[in-house]
Image: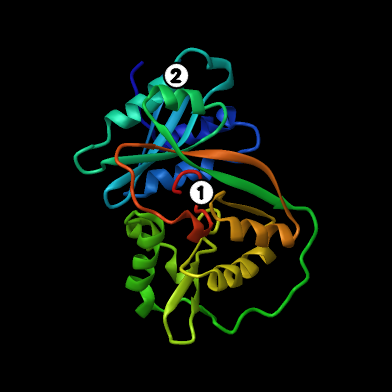
């Protein structure tokens, strides 16, 4: 099974591949195509993609994303083939660690490719509306002079250098500034699932308050027990978990300081 570069013309065929509950995947692949940090690929049959996937590159790590096989072409080894092809296209001397977030369907496929479980994400949602409330006075719109400090905070939490992608969304971010003028948290509402990174629970909870008004769903590591407790107190219920998996050297990261992840494609 030979993989090829995914093209703009292939976007029209994506609705036939959409897994249940994923929603419209066309905007994701449109982003993959326009971003210098992303490399989408496909496997074709009769001139149409029957399996797709993408690799997303940070400073020295990579994430595999949107690995999907057409429902009528499962059990043919396509999931393994597209995963293997993505890995083979990554320069492992530069991107030594590869991550992904595994669905139940994909989990056994990734185990066979050598991935190991590093942790789990809790997926939560709320049914009722949350009444408006005043935001913390420590929350401010992002200011350009905070850019490098925001990158450093994200690197401390994630263990990755994600500035090449993160930088596109900082202009719309909100930050939590401590009493001493130090940056303690960042919320990026326009970056996929709306990630929140914070060095303290106070900052994390304050930014979660802002996020909960606009987002009825939340996803964060099971290791962030304080964040989970906060969401439960505000009407969120966990309905499933997913596995964060790793191939290559483990990094030091702090899942307890991630108050909402970016997405399954980016951590």
Per the image, the residue denoted by label 2 is 78
Is residue 26 in view?
Answer: yes
List the single residue furthest toward the right.
Answer: 128
The x, y position of residue 129, in whole percent, is 78, 62
Whether label 2 touches label 1, CB < 8 Å: no
Mark positioned earlier in the residue sequence (2 or 1): 2
Residue ID at (19%, 39%): 93
Foreground residue, 235 or 222?
A: 222
List the single residue furthest toward the top.
Answer: 76
List the single residue furthest toward the bottom.
Answer: 180
Q: Is residue 256 left or right of residue 161?
A: right
Which of label 2 and label 1 is nearer to you?
A: 1
The x, y position of residue 106, in whole percent, is 51, 27
Residue ID at (36%, 27%): 114
Per the image, the residue denoted by label 1 is 263
Is residue 48 in view?
Answer: no
The number of numbered badges drawn on the structure is: 2
Residue 39 occupies quadrant: top left
Q: What SS does tag 2 mark? A: helix
Residue ID at (35%, 56%): 162
Q: Is residue 93 left or right of residue 197?
A: left
């Amino acid at each position: 099974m030979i993989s090829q570069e995914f093209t703009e013309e292939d976007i029209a065929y994506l609705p036939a591949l959409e897994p249940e509950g994923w929603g419209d995947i066309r905007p994701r692949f449109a982003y993959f195509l326009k971003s210098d940090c992303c490399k989408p690929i496909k496997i074709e049959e009769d001139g149409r993609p029957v399996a797709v996937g993408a690799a997303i590159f940070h400073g020295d790590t990579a994430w595999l994303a949107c690995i999907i096989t057409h429902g009528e072409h499962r059990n043919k080894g396509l999931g393994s083939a597209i995963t293997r092809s993505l890995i083979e296209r990554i320069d492992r001397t530069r991107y030594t660690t590869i991550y992904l977030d595994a669905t139940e369907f994909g989990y056994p496929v990734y185990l066979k490719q050598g991935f190991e479980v590093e942790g789990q994400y809790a997926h939560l949602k709320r049914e009722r509306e949350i009444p408006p409330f005043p935001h913390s006075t420590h929350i401010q719109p992002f200011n350009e002079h905070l850019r490098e400090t925001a990158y450093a905070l994200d690197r401390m939490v994630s263990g990755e250098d994600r500035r090449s992608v993160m930088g596109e969304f900082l202009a719309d971010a909100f930050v939590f500034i401590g009493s001493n003028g130090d940056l303690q948290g960042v919320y990026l509402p326009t970056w996929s699932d709306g990630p929140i990174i914070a060095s303290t629970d106070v900052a994390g909870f304050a930014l979660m308050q802002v996020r909960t008004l606009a987002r009825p769903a939340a996803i964060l590591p099971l290791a962030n027990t304080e964040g989970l407790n906060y969401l439960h107190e505000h009407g969120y219920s966990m309905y499933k978990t997913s596995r964060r998996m790793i191939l290559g050297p483990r990094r030091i990261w702090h899942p307890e300081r991630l108050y909402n992840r970016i997405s399954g494609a980016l951590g």
